Amino acid sequence: MSAKNKDGENSTGEVIWVSGPVVKARGMRHFRMLELVFAGKDRLVGELIELDGDVGTIQIYEDTSGMRPGEPVKGTGNPLSVELGPGLIGRTFDGIQRPLERLREQTGDFIRRGTQVPRLDREQRWDFEPRLEENTDVAGGEILGVVQETPMVEHRILVPPGTRGRLTSIAAAGSYTVEDAIATVTHEKGETTLHMYHNWEVRRPRPVRERLRTAAPLVTGQRVIDVFFPLVKGGVAAIPGGFGTGKTVIQHNLAKWCDAHIIIYIGCGERGNEMTDVLNEFPELRDPRSGNSLMDRTILIANTSNMPVAAREASIYTGVTLAEYFRDMGYHVAVMADSTSRWAEALREISGRLEEMPAEEGFPAYLASQLAEFYERGGHVRSLCNNEGSVSIIGSVSPPGGDFSEPVTQHTKRFVRAFWALDKELASARFFPAINPQTSYSEYVDAVLPWWQDETGEAVGRYLEQARAILRAYQKLQQIVRLIGEDALPDEQKMTLLSARLIREGFLQQSAFDPVDMFAFPLKQARMLRAILRFCDMGRVLVKKGVPVYRVRELSSFGSLMRMKASIENEKTEEILKLQGQVEEEMHRLAREAQISEEELGTEIRSQETGGKEEGGEAEKGLEERADQMMEEHTKADLYQEAKQHDIKGRSSMTKEELAESLAREREEDREKS
Ligand SMILES: Nc1ncnc2c1ncn2[C@@H]1O[C@H](COP(=O)(O)OP(=O)(O)OP(=O)(O)O)[C@@H](O)[C@H]1O
Ligand SMILES: [Mg+2]
């Protein structure tokens, strides 16, 4: 990358117009599009986003108040880039990768505008260990050597993509700063000196050898996600949800517990105290798998609501570029962006100031392509150094009024493959995570089922089918319950409701604040679901054979199943097996009391289970059909009930259709009269 622009000098322009984050300047013809510039006497960082002859439009990543026409604009010759090398992990950066700790040291709590600090620490020394020998041929992306950056992260120093030649020197093991020369590559054009860091343009995706298909889930420890709506390593997901529905809590939970090697958390236009929470909390929290501090694998990018809007975009691109860099070393990286709607709003604001033709709801027409570009940088790849790595992206979306038909949600939906729709009603009932099982989806479900089988030895695919069918039946029964109340339902339906309650409250609902429940290992999740379904299966058979549902509900194992998420720790899943044993014992006792033979019970349950394997659960299908039938019967019964009340002659002999018609006519007449 050249350090100068077209005329070989750092050019200078002159500000002619200032409107919030947008500045126009003349004398710009020698600048490049997307060149990074320093604008005004305070040298505010900005990016040239439009060039029309001699006049350039610049978006400024800092507060422009006080800037006046006549002030200078200096070019840098380079596009907005990040520095990639040791010293990233555990840090907090602003949208243009300035380390916030350093900014604060220099300028106090309120960051002074135009402050220049090096992005990577220039003084810190790192213990470098070479991995290549002199006189070998090297190419971009290869691992030159390593630095143990934190207890959790071995930082692999990469040959910058695009560099190729013979390695004519490489530093011996020892301690170096990022600016010390550690290697020389000789090629036709001469020599290139390599350091422990290199620059990369944030808008340019880093090259990879090939894209791979993914099958391993990104384990999040959140049951509703891992089992019902999983994400894979390299997958892309969105969390749309209205105000206060739990987007940030889910993003924080994922950042804490997901099994990625590296976490990049972008706080984009949201409240600053949420970032402070992360800063305070993460160093104290331990990674459940390695026991290390969570900050040892995390990079924070803070562009909070009180920071300039244009930098929201930069923070998104900076974040995803850092993610690709660690992916290229062979790591699984997860990027959380909270919230992409604030970024979209910044695009809208800037576009408005540029007086561009707006598309839906004032957003610029390029909103969709920008979102696509962002999510496309997710993926599972073979990197240039032949390692496997991935970037998973989870973006939250904050639709105004929780209305998912707005442009940001709709466009995002086109580019993500998992959609965790948060529900206002669930959230206001304090049912968290408020992921609505009806409106959410994941296209990765089938891809991860073999992993579940290998990892836990449990038939999670079958459990999932069964649980989904119970939830669907529950949803249908809910309509009837709303009309006539639960008490009026026959016992079999009450048993379905009881089963759904176990799945919903005992499994899907998960507290982010309970020390045991906050994350669940896959084995715990699988065994919990199995034990719950065992209860549902046996209970259903017994109730069908005449055991009153209240007897099933009274069993002490019911309460234990409801509580196990918080009472049984991840490492003690054998207790879940024991609990399942207790379920079976208690159910058998009920069966004996009702004179149902062990054999009868066993046969019924087995037939349900085998039915469950292929067909998505014969028994569960039965449940759904029964719920449909109930609806039907209920409407019929209603009609007759009404007929009786009105006691109009002849109606009892009418067909259902005639009756409905006659009643409708009567209602119409009533309405006209009143
Ligand atoms: N998994 C959870 N467990 C317990 N409580 C939760 C959970 N998720 C959310 N909450 C509760 O809901 C509140 C709001 O959550 P959160 O701040 O994540 O919402 P949000 O969608 O990010 O809101 P905003 O629209 O303001 O950004 C939290 O403060 C917490 O009390
Ligand atoms: Mg939030």
Image (cartoon, helix red, strand yellow):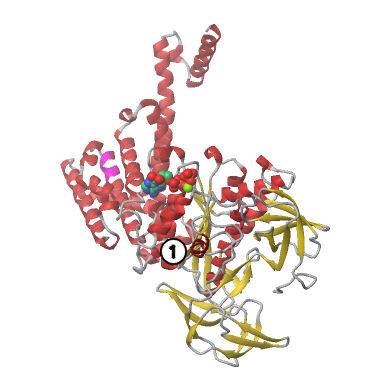
Q: Is mark 1 within 8 Å of ligand 1?
A: no
Instruction: Residue 17 in the image: state x and y as whole percent.
Output: 75, 50
Q: Is residue 13 above or below residue 561?
A: below
Which is more toward the observer, 369 or 293?
293
Which is more toward the observer, 161 or 560?
161
Q: Quadrant of residue 645?
A: top left
What's the magenta bit mostly, secondary-structure-wise?
Answer: helix
User: Is residue 251 in view?
Assistant: no
Q: Is residue 624 above or below residue 169?
A: above
540 in the magenta segment: yes
Instruction: Residue 128 in the image: state x and y as whole percent.
Output: 49, 83
Q: Residue at x 45, y 12 (%)?
A: 651
Task: Answer with left or right where residue 415 lies relative to residue 567.
Answer: right
Report the amino acid beneath label 1: Pro
Instruction: Determine the residue located farthest toward the bottom in the rendered image.
Output: 135
The quarter of the image holding the N terminus is bottom right
287 in the magenta segment: no
Which is more toward the observer, 288 or 480?
288
Q: Residue at x 59, y 80 (%)?
A: 159
Q: For the magenta stretch, what is the residue range?
A: 539-543
Which is more toward the observer, 102 or 127?
102
Q: Which residue carries the number 1 mark?
A: 450
Total labels: the figure holds: 1
Task: Answer with left or right where residue 215 lies relative to residue 49.
Answer: left
Instruction: Residue 304 in the image: state x and y as whole percent.
Output: 52, 52
Q: Is residue 606 above or below residue 494?
A: below
Q: Residue at x 53, y 45 (%)?
A: 398
Assign a secondary structure to mark 1: helix
